[in-house]
Amino acid sequence: MAGALSSSCIFCQITHASTPTTILHQDDKVVAFQDINPSALKHYLVIPVEHIPTVKQLQRRAEDFALVSNMLDVGRALLERDAPHAEQYRFGFHQPPFNSVNHLHLHCFALPYKPRWRAVKYLSLGPFVGFIEAEKLLERIKPASSL
């Protein structure tokens, strides 16, 4: 994967409690918290503790597949707990150059978007550009031995 801690990365600072944030979930692999500028009824981010810049660093490896699967499981559990009656859940990642922070982060939405026009930020612009659904990313990085 990538590296340990990046001192200039705001998300690395959150994972190491250097920045005040209300943590919704934390374990040895991932941390979850509310997006600072929510785009939906509930909008959480799940990030790896390890500094991984973007989805471009993920490969067809068991460890990468397990990490993204875990991120999705954590995000889904949080939304099911906090927004059980939401009209829909959505999970995905921005792909470069459309990511705002160079630390891998899963957007977890309990819809609707608020305001509705915010949905535009989360459009797919093709398989390798824009927003990619978590399940599509998992298909892309599924290890060859699991195919």
Image (spheres, helix red, strand yellow):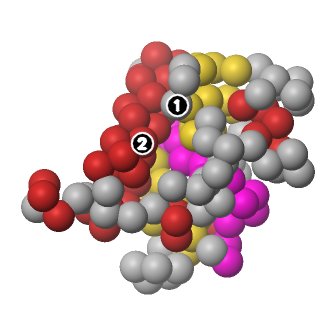
Q: Earlier in the sequence, mark 2 or mark 1?
A: 1
Give the number of marks: 2
Residue 79 visible? The answer is: no
- Packing grade of label 2 (10 A; few <14, some 14-19, many >=20) is some
Give the residue type at disc 2. Leu
SS assignment at label 1 = loop
Q: Where in the figure is residue 139, as x and y percent of width and height?
A: 26, 62
> Camera-side residue: 68 or 24?
68
x 45%, y 29%: residue: 74
Q: Horizontally, is 33 left or right of 48 in the view? A: right
Above/below status of 74 relative to 143: above
Residue at position x 77%, y 28% in the image? 16
Q: Nearer the viewer, residue 41 or 2?
A: 2
The single residue placed furthest to the top in the displayed view is: 81
Say few, some or many: other residues with alpha carbon within 10 Å of mark 1 (under 14 / 14 to 19 / 20 or more). Answer: few
Question: x%, y% of residue 134?
Answer: 40, 54
Image-based side of 10 in relation to 64, left or right: right
For residue 124, the mark is none
Q: Tell me the CA gap for discs 2 and 1.
A: 8 Å
Q: Are marks 2 and 1 in contact (CB under 8 Å)?
A: yes
* Residue depicted at x 60% and y 49%: 105
Give the residue number, with chain letter if any, for mark 1. 29
85 relative position to 31: left or right: left
Residue 86 in picture, x, y percent from top left: 46, 32
The answer to whether one can see residue 30 in this image is: yes
Circle 2 is placed at which residue position? 67
- Residue 60 is a magenta residue: no
The amino acid on which the numbered mark 1 sits, given as a three-letter code, is: Lys
Residue range corresponding to the magenta coloring? 97-112
Quadrant the C terminus occupies = bottom left
| Circle 2: element type | helix
